[in-house]
Image (tube, grey):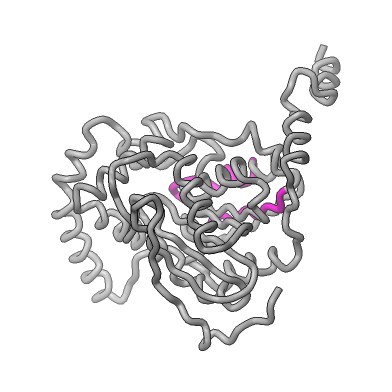
Amino acid sequence: MTAPTPLRNVELRREETRLHGRRISYLTAGEGPVLVLVHGIASDSQAWRAALPLLARRARVIAPDLPGHGASAKAPGDYSLGSLASSLRDLLVKLGHERATLVGHSLGGGVAMQYAYMFPERTERLVLVSSGGLGRSLNPLLRAAALPGSELVIAATIAPLTALGRAGVAAVQRLGLRFTPDLGEFGRGFATLADREGRAAFLDTLRSVVNFSGQRVDATDRLYLAAGMPTLLVWGERDAIIPVGHGYRAQECMPGSRLETFANSGHFPQIDDPHRFAATVLEFLEETEPSCLTPESWSELLRDDPLSDQHPARRRREQAQR
């Protein structure tokens, strides 16, 4: 890795480009190996604001606003994981980067895994932060938001709840207390749903991965494919959105992966403790070699599926159970 740039010399820039005629906005800073930060639902690149300059001391960091989020275009369209992953690939190609390490938070973790699944030869490493797509459990509020008709409830309550939130923040500050980063980020995300286009993009994205029972998309049966991909899992032990148990189970299923838990963090460890978060990610980059998966090695992993009826390990387990 490159020698660290003094923090005072890190220049954070907001830039934008167009993909397929639609605006994509992103934050970028630093020089070195490419690190792509992928935010979660009802969020944007500002979710990385505390950790991004610290990471940019030793890496070229790109933090896009995903399509339908932040300052990027919110036109009607496909907001599935596959479409979002393809948008990331197209953005990186347009910016001249063939390979990158993907750091995904919450929904962004699902996008990062989808990216690695679709474009393994372009993925150097995976960092999954309080990631979606690793089990069904999910906070009931997000499950309720996926119900039919929820757009009417959101539209009717956004203004009074936002006003109430501002008044609550002021009252708590006068008492010398503070909100947790989780509450602050959820409030910031909820405020982005004030316009019709933002609400529509949010609901299209949410319903592609969530229903009232929980998360619809679960990558657990394909985690064996991470055998050739250096992977770091980061989780807050107080996460009330996606439980830390998903991280423990994922580590068991991902050969060679690492799990780092933050005891005092909730759903946003990169905001709760940005210095430790950045140090953990940079240490992971320093201690691991980029993945060198090729179409041929990817095909070999698929053929060696441990869940297949023909896999020797599965046959041995079934014979032992008889």
Whether residue 181 is visible to the viewer of this picture, yes or no, is: no
Residue 81 in magenta stretch = no
Residue 56's image quarter? bottom right
Residue 148's image quarter? top left
From the viewer's perspective, is 187 left or right of 24? left
Q: How many marks?
A: 0
From the top left corner, tell me how far across and down residue 315 is, in percent. Answer: 82, 19
Measuring 64% from the left and 42% from the top, which residue is drawn there? 250
From the viewer's perspective, is 289 left or right of 181? right
From the top left corner, tell me how far across and down residue 61 is, in percent. Answer: 54, 68
Measuring 69% from the left and 65% from the top, which residue is drawn there? 285
From the top left corner, tell me how far across and down residue 77 is, in percent. Answer: 33, 40
Q: Nearer the viewer, residue 320 or 127?
A: 127
From the top left corner, tell me how far across and down residue 321 is, in percent. Answer: 81, 16
Residue 237 in magenta stretch = yes
Vertical side of 8 occupied by 100: above or below? above
Whether residue 231 is visible to the viewer of this picture, yes or no, is: yes
Q: Nearer the viewer, residue 127 or 251?
A: 127
Measuring 66% from the left and 38% from the top, which residue is drawn there? 223
Measuring 30% from the left and 45% from the top, which residue is drawn there? 201
From the viewer's perspective, is 50 left or right of 254? left
Magenta-highlighted residues: 229-249
Vertical side of 159 occupied by 283: above or below? below
The N terminus: image quadrant: bottom right
Residue 222's image quarter? top right
The C terminus: image quadrant: top right
